[in-house]
Amino acid sequence: MLRVLKLFFALAFLLILVAVGGITYLLLGTDPNTYKPELEKLANQNNIELSIEGDLRWSFYPNLAVHAGTTSLSGKEAGIPDIHFKQANFILDWKALLSRTIRLRAITIDGAKIRVESAEEAASVAALPGAAASTQKTQSSALPFEVAIDQLALTNSRIILVTAGAPDRILEQLNFTSKGLNLNGQPFPVTFKVSTTLPDQPSPINIALDTQLKLQLEVQQASLSGAKLTLNGFNKLPLNLGFDALYDGQADSLTLNNVEGTLGSANIKGNIKGQQLTTAPLLTGELSLQNLVLAELPIEAPEGFNKVSIQSQFSASEQSVQLNDLKLALDNFNLGGKLSLKLESPRQLEMVLKGDNLTLPTSNKNSQEGNNAQAAMLSPILAPLALLDGGKGHIELNLASLNSDDIRIEKLHLNLFANGKVVNITDLSGQVFGGSFQTTMKANLGKKSPTVAFTKQLVDIDLLQTLSTLAEQSDVRGTLTMDFGGTTQGDTQDALVANVNGNGKFSVKNLQVDNINVERSYCEMAALIEKQPSTNQTWPNSTLLKDLQGDIQWRDQRILLPGFTTGLGNLAVSGNGTVFLAEERYDMLITANLHGDQTSETGCLVKSKRIQNRDIPLRCKGSFAEDGEGNCLPDSKFISQLLQEKLQNVLFDRFLKKPESTENTATDTDQGAAPEEEKDATQQAIEGLLKGIFQ
């Protein structure tokens, strides 16, 4: 037994010596640089230009390997990009090497620079794991050569993407590792890390992928299972996604299933399928983004809102984009609908949206920034119009209510059509201030100064609520109904308001004007004319009028009321006036005509026949500005006329009227002619004198 053991150990030692001697011969007796011509020739036979500038050398520990120095290769005809690397390590199968067959088990490339100039070259880079896992045998002289790589690593490398007419895109700090590569449908691990920058994103973006890759060459399929994708640095909004993916080369499709992860604070879920990837790409699927904090977005978020959620089924291609079953939530506001956009010329947009109660954040009414912020809230609804590029579009919007500061619009409806540079709003309607409104508008945006034609209808609008909210004054009460139409032009809100030119009709029911009592002014004027002492009657500090009706004209920032009629008690009131919008003031000439001898049941008694059934003008002036006041006084021209008449009568009665006895002794002829002619001449002289005084 002892002799057998000695023989076994002797044989084992002999085999070790043979193995060591063989390896020593290969390492020391064979110069790997002698294989350079063979390798370059082999590459050239496959339309690949290979240039090994550095030395080739062997290493024995920890693995049997060939180390290559600086090397370059390219193959435009074969779709291989320009590749240059500083160092590569080719780990060999030492058992195969004993039979003088070079079989690669692993490749590690460091400091590679890969320049990609076409889609074919990009596909070659993407197919690198599959190419490494394949087996090729080539006989060159007496040198068998096999490629069956079990491990592949690319470290400290970069990929340069070249696009004509655009700056190069660089993927830096590229690291790729995989092991257990095969084409037998068995999964093997793959890790990928890269860093890059975007033109408008100066800070680097870091991308990492960790997954199990499975390749099936016969059916041209590649699948990822349990993939974990992370993206950091993009506008400081980290992305973490998990998904499964399947690429089918025969069907030319890519499917992403079980997509789930986070984008900042938001949760992402969905499924995506891409079809006809190399011919006419079409993406379909469903995505959900829930509870994204608006403060995390790189854009300025609307003030007063915190979170947004969006969910939709989608379809996108080079010809069209469609969003179906769209659901958007902005805090407590919910909006749903659908959208379709045809991208082929002429483009077409169809968008139908329906929402519940939208409350805009409170803003400073005197702040232009606040007004702009509120207007910006609705801009996303109209934003798709910018994509039409001269095409046609239709947007229909329904909101249960829209709240802005103290204004609440219920049952808001918008129906908008766009055709080229012409925008036509066929209906903008709703309920506001206790009544309703409806507006139509047609705007031509193609001109240097856009022009707008519009109509507006108001029904039973509460004036007190309207003016106290919009103008911060509450001197006028009643319900307004108005039909108005006009035109304007300008490219700013101020210009559009300044250039309004229109006409219409209006009526006001239950009209009450505070801080002015027209009846009191009328009675005080009547007492002055009748030389009656003023009474101690208590008058209300307001005027309650009958239904007011009239025409309205708007031009040059002035609202003209050329003729309106109303009344109070036994006074019939008519008049005209002007509202000066820029100065926030008004000037009205109101004419009152008393039917009977008493203005109203609680008014004053007027005995003078010169006042009854006669138009008495009152001049009413006031301000709509804060703390503005108003008054109604007898018109100065009318007062001058009354004084002129009074003086005329006094002068005639005292100085020029003939005694009664003289008139009694006159003949019939004298009574009919001479005194009348004398009276007319005298009266004309008095009127001429007074006219010169009062004018």
Image: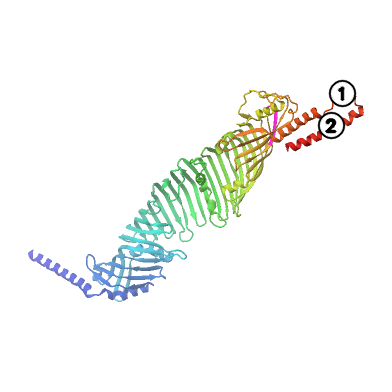
Q: Quadrant of the N terminus?
A: bottom left
Q: Earlier in the sequence, mark 1 or mark 2?
A: 1
- Residue located at (78% from left, 37% from top): 688
Q: Give the SS element for disc 2.
A: helix
Residue 225, position in %: x, y?
Answer: 35, 54
User: In the rendered image, which residue does mark 1 sit on?
Assistant: 661
Visible residue check, residue 269: yes
Which residue carries the number 2 mark?
Answer: 679
Residue 452 image offset from top left, x and y in percent: 62, 49
Q: Which residues are magenta?
A: 569-575
Image x and y of residue 558, in percent: 64, 43
Measure how far apart labels 1 and 2 are at the Cα level.
Answer: 17 Å
Instruction: Residue at 84% x, 31% y: name it.
Output: 679
* Residue kind at label 1, given as amino acid type: Ser
- In front: label 1 or label 2: 1
Compare residues 284 and 263 and report the one nearer the observer: 263
